[in-house]
Amino acid sequence: MESHRNTLSAFSRFALGAICTTLFLSGCTTISGGTSSKVAATTRAEYYPGCYEPVEHLRGSDAAMQKSVATGAVTGGLLGGLTGALTGGDHAARNALIGAATGAVVGGAVGYYTERQKQITDDHARIASYGADIDNSVGDMDRSITYAKAAQDCYQREFTKLQAAHKAGKMSEAEGKKRFAEIISGLKETNALMTAVDGRAGENIDTYTQAYEKDLQQIGVQRQSVTQVAKAKTSKPASAKVPKEAVDTEVKLQQADTKRSQVKQVTSRGTSMISSACNNPDVGDWGAEQCSSV
């Protein structure tokens, strides 16, 4: 009889693990596509390696963002959730309760939310941890903006020189076309990377926001109340129900939205540079092939 009960218990744990795995896999599917595809390196830095150097740094920043907290949490959640269920005891019971609370989060946020619930049991500390993750995303975006602007400014300077050489007849058409093509390619690649950065940042911030909002619900706080305090630019809670950690996290979410707007502005700037170069009457004839798809 004892052996039979043990068998049933083991089966129940396995079933719980399978359910958790299914939930996490649904999130993993969401993350695997969309904006997280890799941007190809399309520029051959023959004439302007100095301009392409910040593009390479931007590529490294984008690669780091691919390893998002959301993706890592899904992988960890798949293994951790299954292992926890199989170990039984209080840990299995807690994992089951956490799993039942994931109804308000979707996609990659399922794994992130569940892992954060396991790692940090204090509600206020956990809400503060979302703010720290948002800060990391803002830092990634800020570095990407710096690299992209540096590349754009460099290519713009080189284009001005190319324009002067074309007008003065001091450069052959063959070399001019190659230089023009490299400038346009570098600007296009920079834009593609910035578009990917914006997409990845959006995925991560959406994940943090879902987890944050779910925890606000858990402690009985309306996000609108937190937003009002955050917009008032005060660190003091509006009431005993609005913890300072939530206000701080809300402020960081506002900062993240501002930074994403800056990312879009830099991308728009790059698009304008490409259009201006391709329509330039002094150099446009050198870019017929490169600009045909612009």
Image: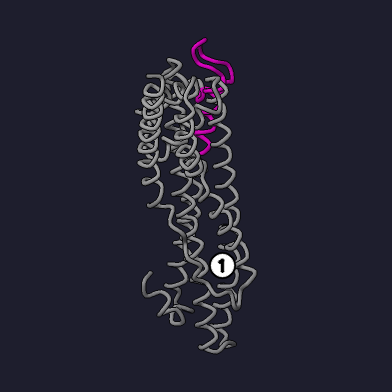
The quarter of the displayed image where residue 108 is located = top left
Residue indicated by mark 1:
156
Q: At 46% from the left edge and 54% from the top edge, which residue is drawn? A: 196
Classify mark 1: helix, strand or loop: helix
Q: Is residue 24 above or below residue 37?
A: above
Q: Is 238 within the magenta?
A: yes
Q: How many marks?
A: 1
The residue lying at 47 percent from left, 56 percent from top is 267
Residue 247 lies, in percent from the top left, at 53, 23
Q: Residue at x 50, y 27 (%)?
A: 117
> Measured from the top left, where is residue 14 in percent x and y?
39, 32
Look at the image and tell me whether residue 51 can be seen.
Answer: yes
The residue positioned 37% from the left and 19% from the top of the image is 1
Where residue 198 sits: x, y (%)?
46, 49
Q: Which residues are magenta?
A: 230-256
Q: Position of residue 45 (x, y in %)?
A: 58, 74
